[in-house]
Image (cartoon, rainbow, N blue to C red):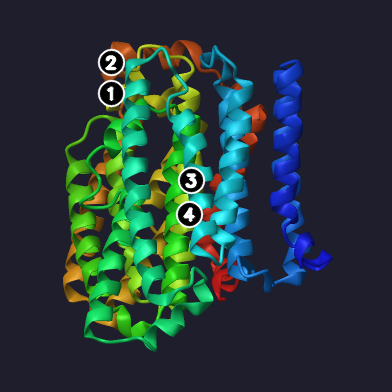
């Protein structure tokens, strides 16, 4: 039986569920974009604030299926922040959503609820349901521009990948259940009782399926084939959601699995993950190096970025900095992505011909919109790991993990990848600072249509605050270190 304290600890999710229900009722009778928009944004803000109340009651078990601890609270906050930012980005480009723009907010709401339950699940079935609840709204979001061919293609490819991923996950979960007889994470330790040559092989086999399922969702090597097409066809406000939420949730579930799983069953698996990390870092950076489409560059760089985060996962048991390193890099990725994608989204509002997807479109941007260019440069510097940004500490912590664990072959790929990423990230910055006489005719749109009034909007306020956060954490990292020292 669930007591009030346990129910109260679900307050952030309950607020979003109530907001989603009320939004659905309003949409059934009379669609009112302003009402639904304000309701959902308020819901995300209240849900974020409620985390401070829930924090006092953790760690807490809710039956045998949910478990909330400080680790969960921190990442629930990250998910809610992304949901809020996605709504704000949508508002800067809502004119492109001709049909039913209200649906966007409801879909974001439902996906965040699914992601929240996936993170706090203590049971493989609840985890799977949470992932599916998160993935289904994403399918609709990926094809929101129904009139555009690439959007439909993106949606179809996401559907296929999501289905394949779910099949692999479900089969891997079934194999573990066949051995342990339990879906609960806390009972994973009992697997060591049944340990034998045959059982260990089946467990490794099951893990390969689970890792494949999450590998497709994270889009690391060798499961990255369609990721660039999906990034190319999806709207920017959905892209922010797609490029962060699914990957963060998948990583956190993987960490939850590894924390509770018997360590002696994971050695071979961790070696396999190191190989995936090695090739993801190299391949993602090499593909991004030759890419001229800014959306595809973001897709390929994400392969390398999340490939490097696998280093934190394989060092979970042997290094106390692993979770801190993971947390700092996730915060860096979220902050940088919101700014970078947010500015691309804003620029795309003046261009219906998709010129903004090419590098040339940004030539000379600094000479027309210096603040916009500077904020974009800060996010790119943080992606690249330039000093005085949070990204620098993210890379520094990963490098420390590599040295302490003596992962020499990973160190080579990480160093080489860092050099390559520096080149293609700085190429965007150089384009923005190129002298005005070299401007291409296409990007004259920027000169004519973008004013500096955006600074005084809620979007501008968000971009400036997040950029300042990147610089602040790039100088003073103590707050984040304390936050992720669990």
Asked if the residue at tag 3 contacts the one at tag 4, i.e. Cβ–Cβ closer than 8 Å, the answer is yes
Q: Secondary structure at mark 4?
A: helix
- Quadrant where the N terminus lies? bottom right
Q: Tell me how far mark 2 sits from mark 3, CA to CA.
A: 45 Å
Residue named by callout 1: 360
Q: Earlier in the sequence, mark 1 or mark 3?
A: 3
Q: Which mark is residue 128?
A: 4
Asked if the residue at tag 1 contacts the one at tag 2, i.e. Cβ–Cβ closer than 8 Å, the answer is yes
- Residue drawn where x is 33% and y is 16% of the image: 149
Q: Secondary structure at mark 2?
A: loop
The picture quadrant where one finds residue 61 is bottom right
**Nearer to the camera, 481 or 192:** 192
Mark closer to the observer (1, 3)? 3
Q: Earlier in the sequence, mark 1 or mark 4?
A: 4
Residue named by callout 3: 132
Q: Position of residue 48 (x, y in %)?
A: 70, 51
Mark closer to the observer (2, 4)? 4
Mark closer to the observer (2, 1)? 1
Q: Position of residue 412 (x, y in %)?
A: 17, 67
- Quadrant where the C terminus lies? bottom right
In the figure, is residue 454 to the left or right of 297? right
Q: Secondary structure at mark 3?
A: helix
Q: Position of residue 361 (x, y in %)?
A: 33, 21
- Residue drawn where x is 27% and y is 50% of the image: 422
Q: Residues within 10 Å of mark 3 (few under 14, many from 20)?
A: some
């Amino acid at each position: 039986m669930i007591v009030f304290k346990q129910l109260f600890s679900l307050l952030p999710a309950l607020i979003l569920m109530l907001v989603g229900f009320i939004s659905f009722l309003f949409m059934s009778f009379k669609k009112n974009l302003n009402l639904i928009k304000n309701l959902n944004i308020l819901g995300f803000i209240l849900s974020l604030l409620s985390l401070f109340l829930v924090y006092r009651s953790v760690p807490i078990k809710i039956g045998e299926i949910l478990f909330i601890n400080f680790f969960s609270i921190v990442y629930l906050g990250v998910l809610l922040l992304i949901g809020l930012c996605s709504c704000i980005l949508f508002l800067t480009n809502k004119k492109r959503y001709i049909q039913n723009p209200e649906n966007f907010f409801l879909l974001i709401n439902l996906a965040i609820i699914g992601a929240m339950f996936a993170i706090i699940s203590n049971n493989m079935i609840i985890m799977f349901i949470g992932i599916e609840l998160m993935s289904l709204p994403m399918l609709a979001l990926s094809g929101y521009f129904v009139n555009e061919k690439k959007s439909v293609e993106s949606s179809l490819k996401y559907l296929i990948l999501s289905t394949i991923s779910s099949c692999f996950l479900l089969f891997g979960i079934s194999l573990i259940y066949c051995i342990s007889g339990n879906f609960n994470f806390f009972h994973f330790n009992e697997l060591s009782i049944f340990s034998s040559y045959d059982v260990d092989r089946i467990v490794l086999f099951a893990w390969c399926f689970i890792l494949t399922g999450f590998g497709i969702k994270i889009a690391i090597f060798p499961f990255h084939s369609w990721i660039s097409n999906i990034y190319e066809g999806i709207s920017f406000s959905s892209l922010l959601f797609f490029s962060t939420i699914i990957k963060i949730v998948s990583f956190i579930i993987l960490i939850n699995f590894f924390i509770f799983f018997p360590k002696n069953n994971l050695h071979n698996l961790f070696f396999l993950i190191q190989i995936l990390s090695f090739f993801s870092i190299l391949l993602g950076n090499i593909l991004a190096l030759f890419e001229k489409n800014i959306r595809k560059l973001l897709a390929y760089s994400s392969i390398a970025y999340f490939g490097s985060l696998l280093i934190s996962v394989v060092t979970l048991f042997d290094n106390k900095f692993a979770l801190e390193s993971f947390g700092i890099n996730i915060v860096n990725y979220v902050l940088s992505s919101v700014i970078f994608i947010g500015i691309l989204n804003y620029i795309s509002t003046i261009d219906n011909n998709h010129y903004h997807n090419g590098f040339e479109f940004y030539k000379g941007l600094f000479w027309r919109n210096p603040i916009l260019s500077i904020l974009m440069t800060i996010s790119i510097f943080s992606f690249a790991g330039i000093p005085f940004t949070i990204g620098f500490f993210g890379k520094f912590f990963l490098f420390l993990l590599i040295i302490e664990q003596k992962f020499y072959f990973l160190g080579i790929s990480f160093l080489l990848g860092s050099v390559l990423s520096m080149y293609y990230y700085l190429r965007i910055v150089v384009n923005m600072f190129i002298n005005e006489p070299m401007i291409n005719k296409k990007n004259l749109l920027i000169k004519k249509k973008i004013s500096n009034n955006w600074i005084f909007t809620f979007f501008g306020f968000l971009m400036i605050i997040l950029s300042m956060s990147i610089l602040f954490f790039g100088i003073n990292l103590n707050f984040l270190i304390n936050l992720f020292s669990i």
